[in-house]
Amino acid sequence: MIQVPYYPLKRVVESFGQELQQATTRVVDSGWFIRGKECASFEADFAAYCGAKYCVGVGNGLEALSLILKGYVALGRLDLGDGVIVPSNTFIATWLAVKAAGLVPMPAEPDAQTFVLNLNSVHDALIHGQYSGVRVKAILAVHLYGRLCPMEKLRAFADERDLLLLEDAAQAHGAAMSWGDSSEIRRAGNLGDAAGFSFYPGKNLGALGDAGAVVTNDELLANAVRKIANYGSEKKYVHECVGENSRLDEIQAAVLDVKLKRLDVDNARRNEIANRYLAEMKNPLVKLPRAATAQENNLADNVWHIFPVHCELPNGESCRDALQQHLKNRGVETLVHYPTPPHLQKAFVDAYGVVDYPVAEKLAREELSLPLHPLMTDEEIQVVIDAVNSFNGESNG
């Protein structure tokens, strides 16, 4: 029986041949390991790739988000205790970043079809904040699973109310959308005031360890983030504010610069696989995600970091666990993103658990992530398709 791994990291790394080894050796031989030429090179390359002016390499994706918020607090755009609209369904890092900056997460339900924020849910969260006495001053839009939020509509909404519009782009490296009535294409990282990226090894653009970046067109924010992330210092041993240590090291920067060159090709392959899944999976018990909208230059609003399906019996009961076991029995590894929404996690349940977020809770009960990565073989893809199509609602079906 063919075994289909969810994301074979070793195979991905090996696919770059000697390039990654050469990059890491170059760093070791240089004798310079923090904030050197490799980091500067990647920051310039990734900013240009995103279509933005500035990129600041940091330690990881969580810190990228928290540093954006802390930077805007330092600049006076946010005050401690302000509310930040966040999705009710996301990885907990989004909420943790808001709390780490001394701000208040204001949950908004996702669109039940796209799983990302929509204009109505954001408006509802803003009204809830007003009734709760929380001054909402920012929207943190999560491009969940690699699908972009409706950023043009959110931009207009934010501008009308003097709100910051921020991107959690941890799963959306390279995702792009048409902007306005022109033929302009904008990528994640250039759709709001600032964006936080994670380069966790399993991401579309992944390092060989923890790494992250802040991308923005706001020079003042970029400078503030760089200062806070370097112990509050611009000049060695001169500390202008209470900072922290969050810096992209030279080895990870060198690795990311190598992998960045192949990102568009890898994302295109992800779209090919997703399109096969969408065309060939035909099981009434398994709800497929909405198809991506193709844009110019082979770019799309979804780069399929995750291919999420939702499984429900005719009586409305979740059959996700049965589907997961069924696929496991056929050699297909799957994951769940995410089994418990943030408001029901112990870290937040005292503040939010008394309030229901039914869309997020339903998605958490039903979601299952299928294998999808650029190095999948056609044989592996067919195994996944056949396994999903053969599911009859029982784990041994």
Image (cartoon, rainbow, N blue to C red):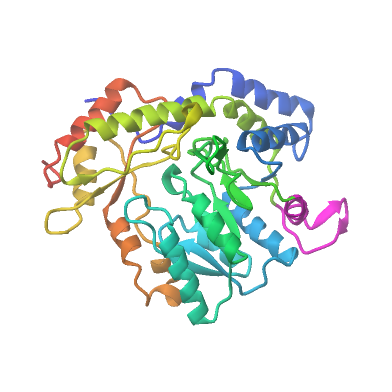
Residue lying farthest to the front in this orientation:
181
State the residue at coordinates (20%, 37%). 388
Is 251 located above or below residue 86 in the figure? above
Does residue 136 show up?
yes
Q: Residue at x 23, y 28 (%)?
A: 383
Quarter of the figure that contains the N terminus: top left
Q: Is residue 206 found inside the magenta-colored segment of the image?
A: no
Rendering coords of residue 7 (x, y %): 40, 34
The image quadrant that residue 352 belongs to is bottom left
Which residue shows up at 22% across the image and 30% down it? 280
Question: Residue 227 appears at what percent x and percent y?
Answer: 78, 54
Q: Is residue 360 left or right of residue 195?
A: left
Is 78 displayed left or right of 282 in the figure?
Answer: right
Q: Was residue 233 drawn as part of the magenta stretch in this picture?
A: yes
**Closer to the camera, 7 or 359?**
359
In the visual, does 168 lie left or right of 358? right
Residue 226, above or below 282: below
* Looking at the image, residue 307 lies above or below residue 90: above
Residue that extends furthest to the top in the rendered view of this protein: 18
Q: Position of residue 107 (x, y in %)?
A: 45, 67
Residue 197 at x, y percent in the picture: 58, 46
In the image shown, does 372 or 128 lie closer to the viewer?
A: 128
The quadrant of the image that shows the C terminus is: top left
The relative height of residue 136 versus residue 166 in the rendered view (above or below) is: below
Taking the spot 53% from the left edge, 47% from the top edge, the residue there is 169
In depth, the one of 165 and 374 nearer the eye is 165
Residue 347 in view: no
- Taking the image as shown, residue 136 lies to the left or right of residue 2, namely right
Which segment did they paint magenta? 219-245
